[in-house]
Amino acid sequence: VQLQAFGGGLVQAGGSLRLSCAASGRTFISYAMGWFRQAPGKEREFVAAISKSGGTTYYADSVKGRFTISRDNAQTTVDLQMNSLKPEDTAVYYCAAGLFASISLVRATKSSAYGYWGQGTQVTVSS
């Protein structure tokens, strides 16, 4: 599966952005999807994940209540709605796809569990 993320940009603190990730291929429904981010000088970190059906979601504590992950299996897209953005949310955001037999919190949060990655989209939140 090939992934392309878009929707990043510059926004003031307190604002909102919606990231989208478009996936190619007919097997999109076979993949759990995740969003990760990497700020300058920091390691890539988990943001959110969603199961194949969309029925289960996981969030990092730092974004819980502010971000919402969703997917449209018919359109083969996964979105990340980001509200109440903070300067510390500034990072390059990556979408990822993982072939999980079943999703779990431990598995979903590990970048090594995902075999496919998009190119990343920059999100900058100004204070």
Image: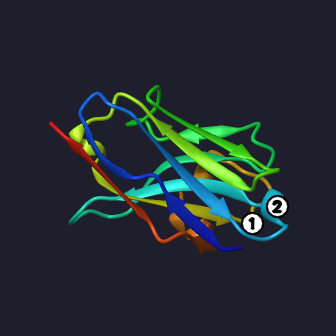
Residue 39 locus on image (x, y percent): 28, 59
C-beta proximity under 8 Å, tags 1 and 2? yes
> Can you say whether 101 is above or below 18 in the image?
below
Q: Quadrant of the C terminus?
A: top left
Q: Quadrant of the N terminus?
A: bottom right
Name the residue rendered at 52%, 64% in the picture. 111
Q: Amino acid at mark 1?
A: Leu
Name the residue rendered at 32%, 64% in the picture. 43
Residue under pointer 1 = 99
> Can you say whether 82 is above or below 103 in the image?
above
Q: Residue furthest left?
A: 127
Residue under pointer 2 = 30
In depth, the one of 6 and 90 nearer the eye is 6
Residue 7 relative to residue 84: left or right: right
Tag 2 secondary structure: helix
Residue 124 relative to residue 58: left or right: left
Snapshot quadrant of residue 44: bottom left
Characterize the local packing of mark 2: few (<14), some (14-19) or many (20 or more) Cα atoms within 10 angstroms.
some
Residue 114 locus on image (x, y percent): 61, 67
Characterize the local packing of mark 1: few (<14), some (14-19) or many (20 or more) Cα atoms within 10 angstroms.
some
Find the distance from the CA under tag 1 to the CA under tag 2: 7 Å
Residue 46 relative to residue 55: left or right: left
Mark count: 2
Residue 107 in view of the camera: no
Nearer the camera: disc 1 or disc 2: 2
> Can you say whether 35 is above or below 68 in the image?
below
Residue 66 in view of the camera: yes
Residue 72 relative to residue 4: left or right: right
Name the residue rendered at 82%, 61% in the picture. 30
Tag 1 secondary structure: loop
